[in-house]
Image (cartoon, helix red, strand yellow):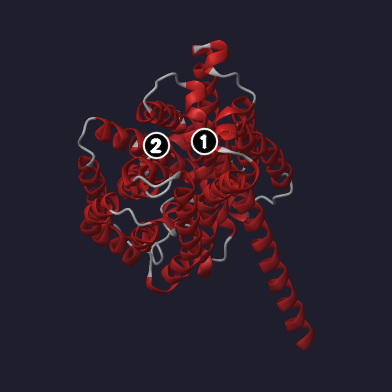
Amino acid sequence: MQATKTMSETENTADAVKRVKAILIGSIGNLIEWYDVYAYSAFALYFAPSFFPAADPVAQQLSAAIVFAAAFIVRPLGGILFGWCADRYGRRKSLMLSVMLMCFGSLLIAVSPTYQQIGVGATLILITARLLQGLSQGGEYGASATYLAEMAHPSRRGFYSGVWYTTLIGGQLAAVLLLLILQKVFLSAEELKEWGWRIPFMIGAVLSVYALFMRKELPETEHYQQARQKNPSSGLWKSLIQHRRELLLVVGMTIGGTSAFYTYTTYMQKFLKLSVGLDEVHVTMIVVGYLVLALLMQPLYGALSDKVGRKPLLIWFGVMGTVCTYPLLSTLSETKNPWVAFGLISVAWLIVSGYTSITGIIKAELFPTSIRALGVGVPYALTVSLFGGTVDSVALGFKQAGHEQWFYWYATACIFISLLVYLGMRDTLTQSRMESHY
């Protein structure tokens, strides 16, 4: 009896170790992919003159932001291609293909000639590279969130969702930390603008190759294997259409969350420089500070959702985001004190983390195994392309037109729309489709 119990405990421990190892490997690969994306945003202040000839810094940043947004246009296609691959051929294969594509995109930016060398051809190369990265990211989210949800223990899915989302934030943090090190230790501002901006993209290409080899060792999830055994010839598209309500729920819950996330990540660096008026070093240090804080919040909020449910955290984000976004951004635009700026953005992250920490797991819990990657990835990618990747362009467009505060209302409206969805949706902690194969 005792021997049987000991063996059972050993098997449980081994199973737990296997789960955690797979989640960590998958998360590290996810971090590398997101580093590649955020390197573009973090270094845009330096490489924009190399690709866009305009003399006005705001116009250059707007052009860079438009190219950044262009990659989001193809994200839905990436969600379809890689989501189909993940649901038909396995999560691991899809994750490997997505990181390969990201490698090509980063390498292309790293070796691209400048506008001064080949004219508009340089801009076209940058656009092509970002489109490749957009395809990769469109597939990465759905396959990665699905893999995490299926590998995590049911009682700790919220916690691991928070851990997984730290990799999204950690990718940007890694890019910004690299920028800070280059600024403070190795290169002058002139050197960064001349050639130093290539360094993060070369590193990203190398890290993507490393992520590829790590993902080769990932085990396939039992959820996927059982689903394929029970229904090997399932019609993915027919099943997806049958879950159109869930698809619309993903769109609705993502509108506010993605606009808030990109406001306080990719756009905030430009906002602190162009609107608040802080210098590059202060901007980078503030960004590092609030990203570290945001990173720490994710698993804490995720673990809380395992206790109280997913819905209360979403409503917290929806209500506080609707009430506080305009006051936070307008006050931030008027301050010149770096510490005040950091404090205001930290308050924003206390609000936004109610969404970011659990968004991946909620979407996965809405769908059965046979269409989970497609169900998560496609509507998410479509919504992010419309309301996330366009944040920089919308905000800078309002600023250039002399109506910057209109963006504050725009961001508020996006969150309010999602709040209405949160109020009407079920709590997926207690009503999950995670164990359903069909």
- Give the SS element for disc 2: loop
Residue, disc 1? 40
Specify few, some or many for label 1: CA neighbours under 10 Å numbering under 14, 14-19, or 20 or more: many
For this view, does 348 lie left or right of residue 7?
left
Q: Earlier in the sequence, mark 1 or mark 2?
A: 1
Q: Is residue 425 above or below residue 231?
A: below
Q: Quadrant of residue 186?
A: top right
Q: How far apart are marks 1 and 2 (CA)?
A: 12 Å
The three-letter amino acid code for the residue at tag 2 is Gly
Provide residue 330's location: percent of width, then percent of height: 24, 51
The three-letter amino acid code for the residue at tag 1 is Tyr
- Give the SS element for disc 1: helix
Q: Are marks 1 and 2 in contact (CB under 8 Å)?
A: no
User: Residue shown at 59%/29% (left/top)?
Assistant: 105
Viewer-side residue, 148 vs 325: 325
Q: In this view, does 333 lie above or below 7?
A: above
Viewer-side residue, 142 vs 319: 319
Viewer-side residue, 233 vs 276: 276
Name the disc covering residue 389, or none.
2
Viewer-side residue, 304 vs 12: 304
Provide residue 76's location: percent of width, then percent of height: 43, 33
